[in-house]
Image: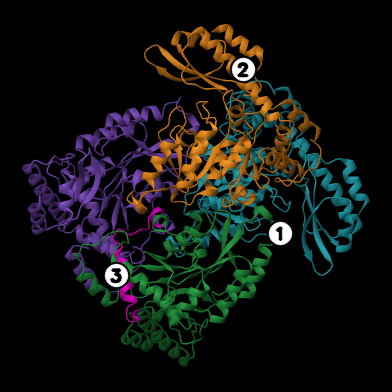
Chain colours: A orange, B purple, C green, D cyan
Amino acid sequence: MEGAHPLIMKRLAEINFDKNIGYGHDHYCEMAREKIARACKAPDARVHFLVGGTQTNAIVIDSILRHNEGVVSPNTGHICTHEAGAIEACGHKVLPMDCKEGKISAQALAQYLKEATSEDYGMEHVVEPRMVYISNPTEYGTIYTLSELYEIRKVCNKYNQMLYIDGARLGYALTAPDNDVTLPDLARLCDAFYIGGTKVGALFGEAVVVLNKDIKMSKGSIKNRGALLAKGWLLGLQFDTLFTDDLYLKIAKNGVDQAMRIRKAIEAKGYPIYLDSTTNQQFVVFEDSKVAELAKYVGFNFIEKVGANHSVVRFATSWATTDEQVDELLSHL
Amino acid sequence: MEGAHPLIMKRLAEINFDKNIGYGHDHYCEMAREKIARACKAPDARVHFLVGGTQTNAIVIDSILRHNEGVVSPNTGHICTHEAGAIEACGHKVLPMDCKEGKISAQALAQYLKEATSEDYGMEHVVEPRMVYISNPTEYGTIYTLSELYEIRKVCNKYNQMLYIDGARLGYALTAPDNDVTLPDLARLCDAFYIGGTKVGALFGEAVVVLNKDIKMSKGSIKNRGALLAKGWLLGLQFDTLFTDDLYLKIAKNGVDQAMRIRKAIEAKGYPIYLDSTTNQQFVVFEDSKVAELAKYVGFNFIEKVGANHSVVRFATSWATTDEQVDELLSHL
Amino acid sequence: MEGAHPLIMKRLAEINFDKNIGYGHDHYCEMAREKIARACKAPDARVHFLVGGTQTNAIVIDSILRHNEGVVSPNTGHICTHEAGAIEACGHKVLPMDCKEGKISAQALAQYLKEATSEDYGMEHVVEPRMVYISNPTEYGTIYTLSELYEIRKVCNKYNQMLYIDGARLGYALTAPDNDVTLPDLARLCDAFYIGGTKVGALFGEAVVVLNKDIKMSKGSIKNRGALLAKGWLLGLQFDTLFTDDLYLKIAKNGVDQAMRIRKAIEAKGYPIYLDSTTNQQFVVFEDSKVAELAKYVGFNFIEKVGANHSVVRFATSWATTDEQVDELLSHL
Amino acid sequence: MEGAHPLIMKRLAEINFDKNIGYGHDHYCEMAREKIARACKAPDARVHFLVGGTQTNAIVIDSILRHNEGVVSPNTGHICTHEAGAIEACGHKVLPMDCKEGKISAQALAQYLKEATSEDYGMEHVVEPRMVYISNPTEYGTIYTLSELYEIRKVCNKYNQMLYIDGARLGYALTAPDNDVTLPDLARLCDAFYIGGTKVGALFGEAVVVLNKDIKMSKGSIKNRGALLAKGWLLGLQFDTLFTDDLYLKIAKNGVDQAMRIRKAIEAKGYPIYLDSTTNQQFVVFEDSKVAELAKYVGFNFIEKVGANHSVVRFATSWATTDEQVDELLSHL
């Protein structure tokens, strides 16, 4: 809901009248690419900068799949539910599978893929799974452990699937108190993933990290989808800033810390936590009367009714959330 | 599994050296169109002849939907499960809903559409339902009653949805013992539907009946999908034959009659009927040892395991099934 | 304009009540594949059977190209002019280049590709050529010599292009009096090509021969485009018949022989030949009064006006054209 | 090559920590929409904000066309040449027609459409033109007069075509010395057009003005193409600023004025003007030695060789070009 980190705004103002080469051929993009590759310990990674998350998912998935191939996704995954058919608009079926709190397990995935790729299963009449999509953190704020990702990778290898992670809120996973995953881990385990900027300090922008050389993503394929920003340096400069002195992780940590303050207070007051999120999204169950009262003072998402008199609401903090804002919220609980 | 009705084969042979105009401008197509429109009591119906069912579904749906619009389908619907992503390849999301024995109820549809079109529900982030797809008979051999279709139509009207019926096996629905639906009913209640030829007496071919003038289906849109048969008269002649002297319904009735003979024998022997089909597909539960034994003598589809020692198998009769073939099957039960 | 060769009609009638496995898994398809691979001296060739030419072009091209890649075509090529946007409907741009009598030269192609793939040329803003499409015979009845094809192949290699030949009327090229190209030559020089059945003796059907293992064409990708014929044996049986005892070439030769009779008579009478076709299509210039007179007796295509009082008309013979039919035409010249 | 007008940068900084509603539901978008509708004297116009020009063209065109319909464009039009197949990726064929200095005449358009829509012309085998795309100014800096646009509109009416104007550099047309077209004229004559922000004072952003109610463009169809900016207020605020106190036209005029200074100096020195542009792009012919010398001091685009020793180069000014920058250029001529 806010703009960008002040350092980004400052640099954008400073270079406003410089003349830069367009379409991502500028040196800010080059610097940002190098810093991201270094942060991922993946010198050969290709890094592309895009404007938004749905665009990013659609282009990456379209760069991997043939038309009769599909992408397996938790049924609460963003590509399943909230992208207005953007994946299908590129010609690809999303194959939803059951999940828990936004996550799939390696075991369930193995079972799903075993069936879906068995010789008997529909043959040429069904969509062949060819890649697996997960989000980290998930749409419910939960995160994957390193060991879980490792097991998922093994399943992907066994069934010849590419693994792609949607990192729209990646900073908030990497700085969660119980996280044990690093950018180099992601670079080692994924075929591609993206580092979300829009929700973590940038005005806009997502950095796709492509590890697998078979993925046909290029400036041309991005332009073909109308997604090549003319003033590409706006993206380069933002990611260069976010990946200088660990700014990305530092500011993400604020979002997580503020969310943990909310969670502790909620637990102390005895409100039920709806699901176990350690990132910047907290889902809490309140009586409906309390929801109505809170709505006067603070912004949140209504998620769904629970029984006759209760509801789940979502609080989302960010890199920009201040102590005062959280104090204000807590004073109304 | 068989070719075409002998009358079709005879006429194809007779006109083999005639010179016909291509691409469906011939007079067989014209005659077939007139006969079908008359059978539907829908003089203004537009009738298009296509080669196969998946092709037909993809083109009709693509003629109706914009990209961010979706088609609601029972989750066992053919477009959901066995078209290799053909609908998605045209850019459209299939929106699966729960169903029972292949059928959806008007009530469940109303509930689904109420949520999916409510103002709160995801807004621009979700795919908007714009049409409803059902099959009659369904993939499980069950059929809709006139009253059920009428209620579904009312729900479609309320939520501004087009209604499209996949009639790949339509003849076997229209001749089922408990059927009360006619072609004119379908023409009155649907925006479009198709009359399946491939499974009911033709070598190949499906006749799409388009009632709603807003559906942009044309020879051009068919050609654009690579589906305009050069020797279109092959389709026209087949449907002209099938719609002369009620041949279509007469031969479909044989498929149903033979299926009813199987069903009665099955019931007499005490084997459990898996679901209540009155059309040409019968789903029966056998012990696995019996399945193995039957497999030596007759062809059927294995569907799924039921418990530890039983399985569901599917018997499908057709217009071409003979008394002798059924006798042979029954002798092995 | 006619149906199929009598041998095909006879065999279709014979097997009409046999029970065959669907979707091209039958043994007729298997036999036809083997015979075609043998005729091409390409044992590893993959052979797919499709229903029509536009469908075939769209699926083959879509199996090769990524979205921001394009297919170079003579600007009179069928995919450029008469496929109702079927290639674009799959997301791909057709890149037209100038041609002469339907043909492109290796030299002109090299010049085109040199520019279109140069570093300066538009970079990510332009569509990258990735394959070359030609027809043999062309839409104007002209054919490529072996040496011309060999040079075109060399250019394709140099610029990393796949080469695909549309053989809708291939039989009439292979039997032209001045032809020196064979099926094994095509299999050696192309990445894929198709052998047209619809215009050469079949009721319908085209056999795609895929030589390059990188082309992702499969039953699944065909089904995904709605092009997998349920009763696939209808295609298998037709091509099995056409590739038994060289029937395909024998009957094609009749079309060419009859066209040559027409051409000789035309030349003898002094009518100007519009372009030098040695295949089943002949383009002749007549005075308009003559055109009007001929129209009373014979069928032909009006092509275009030439000057004030003359027009080009097209005569197309076929495998089914008889001596009597040609005699009749000649009697009116 | 520069960022945004200082007023935009100032306001972005001011609201950086405000909390805004996402996806274009904010009040900046609302205000900008109202101001643009008022500037167009089109109170019912729908206004959508997108990020870039290729994206905008692809989404507008896809909102208008069915798959077998095409868009007529001058063959130097941006959608023909420099959008990496983005229109085709949405399934639509671009139909190029000859043009002069980037412009098409009503007369040539009428001739083109007369042929392309005639009953004989290819029928269902060809792509039907359904809309006309032009740019103003064109890719060569030339502009259309009101009378020219009026005649083009009449032709579009006659042949049932929608008219769409690409205004990537629209400000520089509206402020050209010989311009007689206004925003209300465009709103009256077009079915849709867009007002380019990226090249005229914004960091990024294009405002689509949709006049024809039959055009199915919505937040949903934009999201479906991955083009709905999460922080939509960034677009709203920029266009609100540009359409306050005529800022858009004022700053565009600077670009034109500086270009006219360059043109006058060029003419005074006797260099040939390549084509008659009165907007911010000037195309000049220099000896190659002069080109090499200029390249040391100033940035420009090399366009093409003219004869053995001369070349065309392009100078592009902008809203940000200063007197000093032009003086510097002129000192080297």
In the rendered image, residue A19, in percent from the top left (x then y), is placed at: 80, 42
Work out whether residue A302 or residue A99 is closer to the camera in this orientation and state it: A99
* Same-subunit check for callouts 1 and 3: yes
| Crowd band around label 1 with a 10 angstrom C-alpha radius: few (<14), some (14–19), many (20+) | few
Work out whether residue C218 or residue C151 is closer to the camera in this orientation and state it: C218
Q: Chain of mark 3?
A: C
Contact, CB < 8 Å: mark 2 with mark 3?
Answer: no
Q: Which residues are magenta?
A: C222-247
Left-right relation of B52 to D238 = left
User: Residue C237: which numbered mark, if any?
Assistant: 3
Q: Which residue is mark 2?
A: A258
Between marks 1 and 2, how big is the CA–CA gap?
Answer: 50 Å
Q: What's under tag 2, amino acid-wise?
A: Gln
Q: Mark 3 falls on what kind of element?
A: helix
Q: Which residue is mark 1?
A: C119
Is any part of residue A64 visible from this angle? yes
* Same-subunit check for callouts 2 and 3: no
In the rendered image, residue B59, in percent from the top left (x then y), is placed at: 38, 51
Q: Nearer the viewer, mark 2 or mark 3?
A: 2
| Crowd band around label 3 with a 10 angstrom C-alpha radius: few (<14), some (14–19), many (20+) | many
Q: Chain of mark 1?
A: C
Q: What's under tag 3, amino acid-wise?
A: Leu
Q: Is the residue A16 above or below the residue D74 in the image? A: above
Is any part of residue B280 visible from this angle? no
Work out whether residue D288 or residue B245 is closer to the camera in this orientation and state it: D288
Left-right relation of A39 to B207 = right
